[in-house]
Image: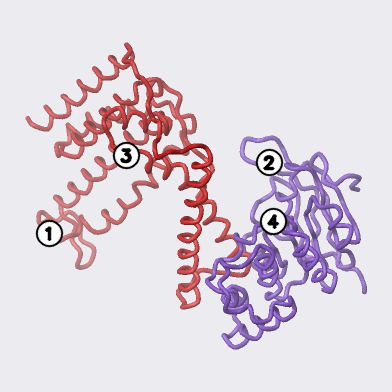
Amino acid sequence: MSSEILIDLCNLRFNYHNRPEVLKGLNLKVTSDHRLGLVGANGTGKTTVLSIIMGLLKPTSGTVEIFGKLRKTEADFREVRPKLGFVFQDANDQLFSPTVADDIAFGPLNLGASRKQADDIVKEVLDSLGLSGFGPRVTYGLSGGERKLVALGTALALKPRLLILDEPTTFLDEKSVARLEAIINNSTLPVLIVSHDHDFLDRVTTKKVRLLDGIIEGQQ
Amino acid sequence: MSYSSELSGSGALSRVDPRLKVIILVVWSVIIALSWDLRALAAGLLGSIILVVLAGCDQKAKFIKRLFLINSFLIFVWLVVPFSFSVPGQTLLAIGPLKMTNEGFRLTFILTVKALEITAGAMAMTVSTSTFDLMAAARAMGAPEKLTAMTALMIRYIRVVGEEFERLVWAMRIRGFVPKLTIHCLRSYANLAGILLVRGLDRGERVHAAMLCRGYKGRFFFDRQYQLRALDGYVALVFFILSALVVILDVI
């Protein structure tokens, strides 16, 4: 498989209102031939990096290139967000529909799928996650592990070009982590995972980078 | 909209007895609301400006922005009242079949000034008083304990619910959600409202459980001893004079 640059962050600087700079000229490339893990201590700006990639925060300077094009405006990001397959740290933040099927269908419907197409996607996604028959379940009543998988499903339903997971193993027990791990390893999608869990990253990623003092350690 | 930023003021008003502040705010609001004379409202404007200056808010632009945000409903008043048939009078301006009357214009203008004066005064009071002081003052003046506790909890958690709302909306936008007037969108909004209610209830239970774990027995302690000082006397005197001025100007 030839390598393609999916995300290219160049010289990013960022600080929250009236606070010291979190990112100090960070460079980071996410390519299609790597499963990339991003580590770093609390407060080093890992979630900030993800928020900038998703266009939820605007960097004070530096450029964000996604799928080979410079992304600046809300319209630019609106176009790429569904293709980025972002999964929130807390699945509760992502699931808001009464049933699992509703929630997974939400994305495809936004992108203009018909009800029939959306239902097909729901079935396909649930089957691929080993959650067949979960469609009518109430999202609120799911266990933490199931909820995480459904949240992952809502991202997969958009047919993304990569997956971005923010601290995927928090709130999960070992069994659920193992399930998540199997799904990531069986998928052909490139991933970007932010985590503290080094063991987990060793098992699901092919490359690890560390965020230290506002830049990627040893960045060019 | 941001829930994480709070306005605060550290001017002289922040050192005034909160009980006095509540009394001044109530009296001031009632007097302004009942005045219809332009001279009285001019004096009212002076009073409200004094309050805002004394509050000493450190983020002036934000204060003004919020003041206008609170009063944004006035746009609708301006769109309707000057042209209303219920305010007959001399025609000032005609746009097609719509006629703006002198009296309608005057009425709307007075309403605008009153709303701005009252909200500016109220904001000056709230930015210069901590939630705890506000609750303690309410208790000291005989407000029911339950009501006070509910208000305090509401002030504490409205931002948490707001943040939850923001995260959910972001999660929706990430999945390509664009607000439109379609069944799909309306359903999504209904789901959003529903889940916020369910979460709110759940959070309420968790907070209650956490309170029980720390020995909560159904009582809140908002009691604090206040003592009137010289500053309180000056502020009270200034506002007594200003209030009297507004009333006299309105009556004569």
Distance from label 4 to label 2 (Cα)?
Answer: 28 Å
**Above or below B143: residue B164:** below
Name the quarter where the C terminus of chain B is drawn. Answer: top left
Residue A171's tag is 4
Secondary-structure class at tag 4: loop
Distance from label 1 to label 3 (Cα)?
Answer: 27 Å
Relative placement, left or right, of A156 versus B18 is: right
Find chain A in the image and tell me its colour.
purple
Secondary-structure class at tag 3: helix
Secondary-structure class at tag 1: loop
Residue at x-position 68% and y-position 59%:
A54
Nearer the observer: mark 1 or 3; the answer is 3
Q: Chain of mark 2?
A: A
Query: Residue A175: percent from the left, percent from the top?
Result: 77, 64
Q: Residue furthest bottom?
A: A116
Residue under label 3: B119
Residue under label 1: B86
Distance from label 4 to label 1 (Cα)?
Answer: 62 Å
